[in-house]
Image (cartoon, rainbow, N blue to C red):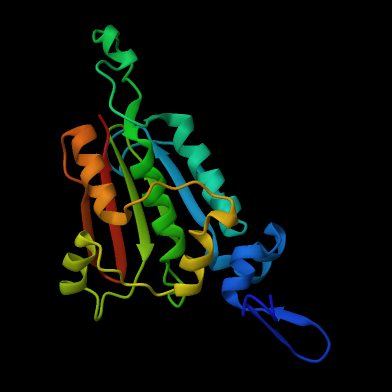
C-alpha cells in the first residue's frame, strides 16, 4: 500500500491506509467500523414506487469487492440478467398468471450501473447513503454527489463518455482486471445504449439536491 500503490502512509509505527486503500483492500469488518458511511442500503419494493410495501431491505457493508458482489447477488435474487435479449422471455408463456413476472435486464448494463455507484460516491456527503431500489419494472441507484459544478453541463457530457471522476484512484484500481471483478466495456454510453436496446426504454439519469440518480427499466 505504501511503497507501490500510493494508498497508505507510514506514521513511524504502522502503515495507515488512505480512504481509497481501505475501501479497496480493507477487511470487511474494519471498513464497516471505520467508514460506516460507505455502507449501501438495498431495498426490494413490491410495486413501482417507494410508497409500496417493502419486500426486503438490507444494509451491505464491506470493501468494494464485497459490496459489488453482494449487490449483484441481491439484484439476481429478484431479476433475471441476460447478455443479449432473448427472442422470448421464459415468463412470457404464462401471461395470464396473477403473479408479476421477474424483470429482465441487460447484465453488462447492470454491472456498469453498480460499479459506477461504488466508485463515484461522494463520501464527503456523510449524511446521505447510497441506495439501490428494486421495483417491479425498474432498478434505481441513488448516490451522494455534490450538484454544484456538476449539473447540468457535466451531466450531459458524461452521456458521451466524458468522465467526471471524484475518486480517480478508486476507479483505476477497481476497474483493473487484476482487482478480480468482471465488467462490461464502454462505460456509461454502453449502459445507456444497451439498456435502451434491451428494454425499449431510455435509462434516466438526474442530478439534484446533492444526489445522482439512475433509473433503468426492465423488459
Most extreme residue toward the bottom is: 12
In-front residue for pair 63/42? 63
Q: Is residue 126 visible?
A: no
In which image quadrant can residue 163 be found?
bottom left
The residue sitting at 61% across, 59% down in the picture is 63
Residue toward you, 161 or 103: 161
Residue 140 x/y as whole percent: 32, 48
Residue 36 on image: x %, y %: 59, 66
- Please, is residue 32 above or below residue 99 in the view? below
In the displayed structure, does residue 70 sit left or right of residue 52?
right
- The reply to whether residue 139 is visible in this rendering is yes
How many numbered discs sit on the rendered protein? 0
- From the top left corner, tell me how far across and down residue 143 is, in percent: 37, 62
In this rendering, is residue 56 above or below 93? Answer: below
Q: Residue at x 46, y 59 (%)?
A: 118
| x then y, percent, for residue 78 | 43, 30
| Quadrant of image for the N terminus | bottom right
Query: Which quadrant of the rendered structure holds the C terminus?
Result: top left
Which corner quadrant of the image does residue 82 belong to?
Answer: top left
Residue farthest toward the right in the current orientation of the protein: 13
Q: Nearer the viewer, residue 163 or 16?
A: 163
Q: Is residue 88 left or right of residue 108?
A: left
Instruction: Identify which residue is drawn at 52% across, 60% down.
Output: 174
Amino acid at each position: 500500500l505504501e511503497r507501490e500503490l500510493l494508498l497508505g502512509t507510514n506514521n513511524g509505527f504502522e502503515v495507515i491506509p488512505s480512504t481509497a486503500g481501505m475501501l479497496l483492500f480493507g477487511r470487511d469488518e474494519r471498513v464497516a467500523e471505520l467508514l460506516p458511511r460507505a455502507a449501501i442500503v438495498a431495498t426490494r419494493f413490491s410495486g413501482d414506487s417507494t410508497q409500496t410495501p417493502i419486500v426486503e431491505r438490507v444494509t451491505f457493508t464491506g470493501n468494494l469487492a464485497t459490496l459489488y458482489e453482494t449487490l449483484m447477488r441481491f439484484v439476481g435474487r429478484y431479476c433475471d440478467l441476460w447478455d443479449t435479449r432473448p427472442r422470448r422471455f421464459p415468463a412470457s408463456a404464462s401471461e395470464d398468471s396473477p403473479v408479476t413476472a421477474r424483470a429482465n435486464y441487460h447484465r453488462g448494463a447492470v454491472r456498469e450501473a453498480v460499479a459506477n455507484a461504488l466508485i463515484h460516491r461522494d463520501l464527503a456527503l456523510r449524511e446521505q447513503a447510497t441506495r439501490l431500489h428494486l421495483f417491479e419494472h425498474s432498478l434505481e441507484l441513488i448516490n451522494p454527489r455534490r450538484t454544484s459544478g456538476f449539473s447540468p453541463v457535466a451531466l450531459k457530457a458524461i452521456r458521451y463518455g466524458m468522465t467526471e471522476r471524484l475518486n480517480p484512484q478508486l476507479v483505476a484500481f477497481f476497474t483493473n482486471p487484476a482487482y478480480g471483478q468482471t465488467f462490461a466495456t464502454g462505460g456509461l454510453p454502453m449502459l445507456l445504449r444497451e439498456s435502451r436496446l434491451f428494454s425499449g426504454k431510455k435509462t434516466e439519469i438526474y442530478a439534484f439536491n446533492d444526489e445522482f440518480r439512475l433509473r433503468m427499466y426492465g423488459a
